[in-house]
């Protein structure tokens, strides 16, 4: 009987050590995955050209305004200097009636949607601000539409970002 109890005890210790170790490894794995999701920006080739959508703040803070921007990137082949010139002379901007709306949602959590519109500056770069309400991993999704384009052909760009 004592021998049996000793064996059971050893078994329980094994299960405990293995369980804690395994949980730690899983937690680390999740952490690594979450970090690889923190892109803060996305660039997509779309029917309007190459669009870049990003968060301007490197370290977003909960309950604080975060600035986002969206712009049409210069065509491949032109160097960045040309790209800047293009934007300066408004030859590389989105169609005038382009509408850009953004939603912010928490990843794997249902705590509501923050929505805002972006407006273009004089260089045709769209800007907007939203307030992530909780620390954690968030998804920003931009929806780009213009004039007579059907809603189901709207362009979507999304990235994840970390909120402290
Ligand atoms: Cu949340």
Image: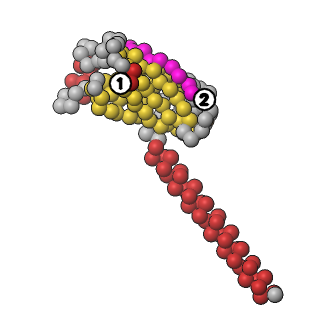
Per the model, the C-alpha gap separating discs 2 and 1 is 25 Å
Q: Position of residue 86 (x, y in %)?
A: 24, 19
Q: Reading the chain from its start, which is encountered first: label 2 or label 1? A: 2
Q: Secondary structure at mark 2?
A: loop
Label 2 residue near ligand 1, CB within 8 Å: no
Residue 96 visible in image: yes
Q: Are marks 2 and 1 in contact (CB under 8 Å)?
A: no
Residue at label 1? Answer: 153
Frontmost of labels 2 and 1 is 1
Relative side of 148 to 56, left or right: left
Q: Residue at x 81, y 87 (%)?
A: 2
The residue closer to the viewer here, 7 or 70, is: 7
Q: Position of residue 85 (x, y in %)?
A: 24, 19
Was residue 119 drawn as part of the magenta stretch in this picture? yes
Residue at label 2? Answer: 112
Image quadrant in which the N terminus is located? bottom right
Q: Residue at x 52, y 29 (%)?
A: 104
């Amino acid at each position: 009987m004592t021998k049996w109890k000793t064996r059971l005890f050893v078994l329980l210790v094994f299960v405990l050590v293995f369980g804690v170790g395994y949980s730690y490894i899983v937690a680390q794995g999740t952490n690594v995955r979450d970090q690889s999701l923190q892109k803060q920006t996305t660039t997509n080739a779309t029917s309007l050209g190459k669009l870049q959508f990003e968060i301007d703040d490197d370290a977003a803070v909960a309950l604080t305004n975060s600035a986002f921007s969206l712009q049409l990137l210069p065509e491949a082949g032109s160097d960045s200097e040309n790209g800047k010139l293009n934007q300066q002379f408004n030859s590389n901007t989105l169609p005038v009636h382009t509408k850009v709306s953004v939603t912010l949602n928490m990843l794997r959590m249902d705590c509501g949607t923050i929505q805002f519109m972006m407006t273009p500056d004089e260089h045709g770069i769209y800007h907007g601000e939203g307030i992530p309400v909780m620390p954690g991993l968030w998804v920003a999704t931009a929806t780009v539409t213009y004039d007579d384009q059907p809603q189901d052909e709207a362009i979507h760009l999304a990235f994840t970002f970390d909120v402290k």
